């Protein structure tokens, strides 16, 4: 990705889910993505609805599909 382009929060959360192995807590994803835990939770909820992520525990998520960078 060229330096002039920036990722959206959704893209950054997906990137972090792909980068970090196994299930990841929402707060850790928020910190890695540079956003608040509440906003990361909303993004993760949408990702679960679309099938890109799965909730595997309380506040814990994992990637369900391969994501192209």
Image (spheres, helix red, strand yellow):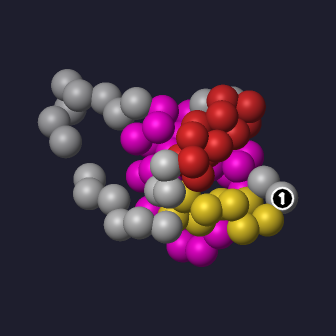
Give residue 41's quadrant in the image: top right
| First to last magenta residue range | 9-34
Q: Which residue is drawn at 47% across and 56% down?
A: 52
Asked if residue 63 is among those painted magenta in the image, a careful observer would answer: no
Give residue 18's quadrant in the image: bottom left
The quarter of the picture where the N terminus appears is top left
Q: Can residue 8 be seen in this view?
A: yes
Taken as a whole, is the magenta stretch helix, strand or loop?
helix
Q: Position of residue 58 (x, y in %)?
A: 83, 58
Q: Say whether residue 68 is left or right of residue 60.
A: left
- Count how many numbered circles sit on residues in the image: 1
Q: Which residue is drawn at 59% across and 52% down?
A: 48
Q: Can residue 24 be seen in this view?
A: no
Q: Which residue is drawn at 20% across and 25% down?
A: 4
Residue under numbered circle 1? 58
Give residue 21's quadrant in the image: bottom right
Q: Say whether residue 39 is left or right of residue 66.
A: right
Which is more toward the observer, 9 or 43? 43
């Amino acid at each position: 990705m060229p330096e002039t382009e920036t990722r959206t929060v959704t893209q950054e959360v997906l990137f972090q889910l792909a980068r970090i192995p196994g299930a990841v807590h929402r707060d850790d994803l928020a910190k890695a993505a540079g956003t608040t835990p509440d906003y990361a939770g909303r993004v993760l909820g949408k990702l679960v609805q679309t099938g890109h992520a799965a909730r595997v525990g309380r506040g814990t998520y994992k990637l369900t599909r391969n994501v192209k960078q």
